[in-house]
Image (tube, rainbow, N blue to C red):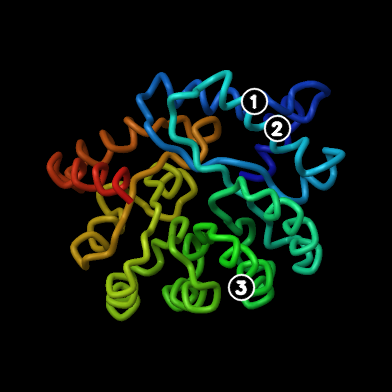
């Protein structure tokens, strides 16, 4: 996946004057697909590398939203890669958090790159700033990895987290804690995390009382928008139309 991205996607968006393209395209697609709310934003390392000040980066991103999709409820997000040095992430994030404009924080990248404990500092700062705390975990790891990330980072939401479905104890923990898992069925299928969509863990998680949402992950890479994700689960008889509508409504009311 990363090799494909570097070969075919990276050169397009990294070319001079094209940094805005993926953000513009995402907002345009939200409008076309009837998406009412989206979390999207900037990597703290990219901001440090490409903008003179954090305020400049924020103004640039805010203007794209205003121009392309002002009616979409946008939750501006800060993100960081597990491949980055934790002390650098904290330094890069600090001035962005001080702006008071971002609403969520996410950690992504190779789950094995660094333990979640290494990023406790930046998560404590993000929590103090009132941000919703998320982390990519349990897409490839184990159920215990999901539980540990929630406990150590005090997460509100988990990105993917499907490994939790392998443990009744992990699912009970998530259900009791009210932590939401943001699931991406097509991504899981195309990356080989699940063999058949009919076997997707959303069924077990939902039945165990875990809060879940349905998401499209990266539409450019996986070729699926949000409506198609819901339709995929319905047509495979993984979830009923009533259940999917309840999931949709719950995501909008959070």
Residue name at image x 33 percent, y 49 percent:
213
Residue name at image x 21 percent, y 43 percent:
244
Where is the N terminus found, in terms of image quarters? top right
| Residue position for label 1 | 63
Q: Position of residue 180 (x, y in %)?
A: 36, 60
| Residue position for label 3 | 116
Report if the CB atoms under discs 2 and 1 are less than 8 Å apart.
yes
For residue 227, side relative to residue 160 (left or right): left
CA separation, marks 3 and 1? 33 Å
When asked about the image quadrant of residue 128, the answer is: bottom right
Q: Position of residue 80 (x, y in %)?
A: 67, 55
CA separation, marks 2 and 3? 31 Å
**Nearer the observer, disc 3 or disc 1?**
1
| Residue position for label 2 | 59
For residue 190, side relative to residue 83 (left or right): left
Q: Residues within 10 Å of mark 3 (few under 14, many from 20)?
A: many
Q: Position of residue 235 (x, y in %)?
A: 20, 36
């Amino acid at each position: 996946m990363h090799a494909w991205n570097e070969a075919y996607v990276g050169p397009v968006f990294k070319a001079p004057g094209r940094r805005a393209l993926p953000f513009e395209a995402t907002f345009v697609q939200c409008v076309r697909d009837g998406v009412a709310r989206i979390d999207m934003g900037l990597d703290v390392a990219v901001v440090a590398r490409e903008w003179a000040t954090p305020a400049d980066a924020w103004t640039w991103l805010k203007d794209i939203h205003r121009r392309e999709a002002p009616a979409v409820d946008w939750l501006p997000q800060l993100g960081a890669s597990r491949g980055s040095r934790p002390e650098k992430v904290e330094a890069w994030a600090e001035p962005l958090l001080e702006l008071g404009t971002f609403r969520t924080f996410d950690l992504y990248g190779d789950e094995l790159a660094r333990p979640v404990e290494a990023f406790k500092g930046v998560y404590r700062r993000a929590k103090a700033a009132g941000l919703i705390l998320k982390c990519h975990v349990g897409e490839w790891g184990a159920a215990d990895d999901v539980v540990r990330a929630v406990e150590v980072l005090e997460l509100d939401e988990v990105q993917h987290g499907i490994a939790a479905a392998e443990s009744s104890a992990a699912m009970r923990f998530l259900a009791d804690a009210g932590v939401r898992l943001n699931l991406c069925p097509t991504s899981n299928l195309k990356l080989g995390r699940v063999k058949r969509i009919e076997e997707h863990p959303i069924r077990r998680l939902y039945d165990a009382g875990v809060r879940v949402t349905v998401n499209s992950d990266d539409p450019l890479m996986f070729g699926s928008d949000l409506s198609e994700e819901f339709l995929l689960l319905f047509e495979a008889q993984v979830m009923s139309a009533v259940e999917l509508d309840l999931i949709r409504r719950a995501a909008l009311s959070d």
